[in-house]
Amino acid sequence: MTKKILVTTDFSENSKAGLHFAIQLASQNNYDLVFFHTPHILIPTAWNNNRMGVYEEEQVKIYEDKLHVFVKEVYESLNITPLKINCVVKNSVFPQSNIMEYAAKNSFSYICISTRGAGKAARMLGTNTGNLINHSDVPVIAVPDNYTMTPITSVLLASDLIDFKKEITQAVAFAEPLHATIELLHLTSAFEHNEDLKAIEASVKAESVYPIHFNLLNRDPDTSLVADIEGAVRKMNPSLMIMFTEQNRSWFEKIFLSSKSAEYSFNAKVPLLVFRKV
């Protein structure tokens, strides 16, 4: 069965990065792309249900035409002629919930969205990308707004090694059809024993039918975990990074101890694919 990617856009220049990455990904594997826009259509409450329904349908059609033109122009700028452009517009007051609901209901493999840096206030209140990462059951691909289309040849899997077998299985399922290499990155702490890490490395090499390169980097106690991850990304320069996030944390933890994968997405230098830990 062909996998599907829900590619979101708000028609901005920044959102084109998500389209570019999805188009690149589809060129390397058999993915169906569905381009998605979620407007908030204001409808006078004084109207009766029939009039409101007709007006909403008219506005959705206008947005669908606009979305088709927008996507077509992106393809033209890349000198690519698509066989078909699939566009969907769903009206909603809550864009993140709308995206997640549509993706889950229609069995999408990934949600693809562009992202850009956010200040402290935006981090606290959440952004479309951060909220999707923290709440979506469907894996999210966050693409930095300065992304330049290039073949996906290498994947960096950042792992805490707690459930490395499942994480590697999902990373291989993504990377293998692309013929991309996989680097597994673990940032060690003073509390971990070398013998345990060597045993895990041996297990990875023994059990994985796909070649996995094991990388251990010592944590810098004077910097944050996210800063260490970003440093590793600069050094290793992967085409994409994979992380896993825990979504079953308390409200307090979500605000004051933000998800490392969501935090990284605000300053991402390469596309980030986030799976939900289960």
Image: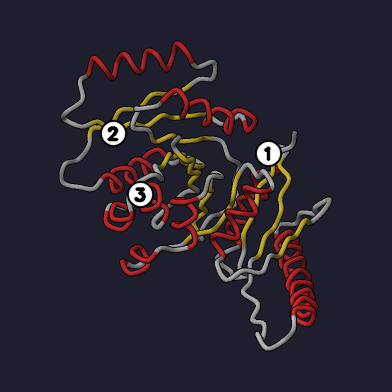
Crowd class of label 3 (few under 14; some 14 to 19; many from 20; radius 10 Å): many
Quarter residue 266 falls in: bottom left
In percent of width and height, residue 185 lies at 37, 32
* Residue type at the position of mark 2: Leu
Which one is earlier in the sequence, the residue at label 2 or at label 3? Answer: 2
In percent of width and height, residue 123 lies at 35, 63
Q: How is the image coloured?
A: secondary structure
Number of the label disc, if any, that sits on residue 259: 3
User: Compared with residue 90, is residue 175 higher up or lower down, i.e. above or below?
Assistant: above
Residue drawn at x 51%, y 60% as measured from the top left: 145
On screen, residue 270 versus residue 62, left or right, reads left
Quadrant (top left/top right/bottom left/bottom right) for the C terminus:
top left
On screen, residue 135 versus residue 187, left or right, reads right
Which one is earlier in the sequence, the residue at label 2 or at label 1? Answer: 1
Number of the label disc, if any, that sits on residue 187: 2
Residue drawn at x 79%, y 72% as measured from the top left: 61
Number of the label disc, if any, that sits on residue 28: 1
Which one is earlier in the sequence, the residue at label 1 or at label 3? Answer: 1
Crowd class of label 2 (few under 14; some 14 to 19; many from 20; radius 10 Å): some
* Residue type at the position of mark 1: Gln
Mark 2 vs mark 1, CA separation in Å: 31 Å
Quarter residue 236 falls in: top left
Q: Are marks 2 and 1 in contact (CB under 8 Å)?
A: no
Mark 1 vs mark 3, CA separation in Å: 30 Å
